[in-house]
Amino acid sequence: MLGGPIDRLSDIPAHTQVKRRILDALLGDGLKVGAVLPSEVEIANQLAVSRMTANKAILSLTAEGWLVREKGRGTFVAERPSRVLDRCVILMRPLALAGAVEDYYHGSLYWGIRNYFQAFDIRVDIAPMDLGFAEQFQEASDTVLIAMNPDPAAAAALSAMGRAGKEVAILGSSWEGGHVNTIDSDNLLGAALAVNHLVEFGHKRIAFVGAGLEDSNTVDRLRGFRVALKGRLLALDESDVFLGQNTSGLDDPTVERFIHGLRSNNRFTAVFAAGPHLAMQILGICQREGISVPSELSIVSYDDPAFLRMTNPPLTTIAQPLEAMAVRACEVVMQARSLTQIESQQVIMDPALVVRDSTAVAYPSRTNSESFL
């Protein structure tokens, strides 16, 4: 029905050749309306490709309306392409739009999404999560949505869109209780990796620096920080928690409070900064205050943009698998579109500790003689 193995010497990608073979069968007499499509394994064996390649071709044809998938039953030939997928819209907070593609975090996710959909000839656009975004896209049958780290109000609107049948995924933050796909890295694990690394160096008093009081990532990283300290039998002095009002960094009053903490005799000997720009801000404060990093203060950052490797010293950090997260978000919305019924998915991926030169054994004269139990 589909012919023999594909042409391995062709410049045409393997999944595109598989897609064309299936489409030829749909347009010819090989597969009629209502017929069950052979399984991915059967297609892969017949065309001598991997199952992943076969799956990619089937997802593309389903998104274009040629096929319909029913959970537990299989994939069937549709009557006609009625739900053509034309584009993926990446939703961002309005304040994050400026320079988003060049930004490490948003840019990594954007290019991961764009490269994925480019293989399917699906356009990728960017739009703000403003007051009218739900009404704008709810009825856009040719569009799937991937929302990057929405605020609470936007997350609630996205959840409502998911309940109404819209193919939506939230990428880069976790929201419990909503009927919406979420793809994120494990912020609690990331915080634990940072704390455990610092405790192994003998640090007993560790400060937390975060920004964005309602940002889900900040909330989760602070929660993970608290849990990790408790797990190491260390209590958190609440005066060592420094939170900025927004995600752009620490505001002046918080910076002043942080500097006051640095100057105290019985101060913290290490800092867990919940973002790379925060870590850079802390490093700059230390340089101005004459605090040597890491001999007098150790710093662990979050995320891994190139500038963290070029600082003096290069910064130890927690790296998220951003590219893998972006690809998984694409797969989730494609699956949501290709199946007639599917439950929302919550995907959590593991971050990794990247050790560089900004962490060291706790400075002897600053090490607390006992933990704050």
Image (spheres, rainbow, N blue to C red):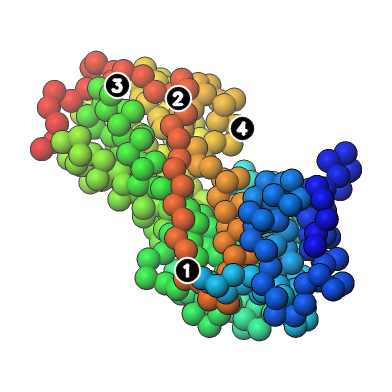
Q: Amino acid at mark 1?
A: Ser
Q: Is residue 227 above or below residue 142?
A: above
User: Of marks 2 and 1, which one's residue comes earlier in the chain?
Assistant: 1
User: Of marks 4 and 1, which one's residue comes earlier in the chain?
Assistant: 4
Helix, strand, or loop for circle 1? loop
User: Of marks 3 and 2, which one's residue comes earlier in the chain?
Assistant: 3
**Mark 4 lies on residue:** 306
**44 or 104, which lies in front?**
44
Left or right of 47, for residue 232: left
For the residues labelled 2 and 4, the Cα–Cα distance comes to 14 Å
**Mark 1 lies on residue:** 344
**Residue at coordinates 44% horizontally, 43% vertically from top-left?**
350
**23 or 314, which lies in front?**
23
Q: Which mark is residue 355?
A: 2
**Callout 4: few (<14), some (14-19), or many (20+) C-alpha neighbours within 10 Å?**
few
Can you tell which of label 1 and label 3 is closer to the viewer?
Answer: 1
Q: Amino acid at mark 2?
A: Val
Q: Which mark is residue 232?
A: none
Helix, strand, or loop for circle 2? loop
* Residue 221, x across and y down, in percent: 37, 48
User: Of marks 1 and 3, which one's residue comes earlier in the chain?
Assistant: 3
For the residues labelled 3 and 4, the Cα–Cα distance comes to 25 Å
* Residue 166, x across and y down, in percent: 58, 77
Helix, strand, or loop for circle 4? helix
Assess whether mark 2 and mark 3 are in contact (beta carbons under 8 angstroms): no
**Callout 1: few (<14), some (14-19), or many (20+) C-alpha neighbours within 10 Å?**
many
User: Of marks 3 and 4, which one's residue comes earlier in the chain?
Assistant: 3
Q: Is residue 358 above or below residue 172?
A: above
For the residues labelled 2 and 1, the Cα–Cα distance comes to 36 Å
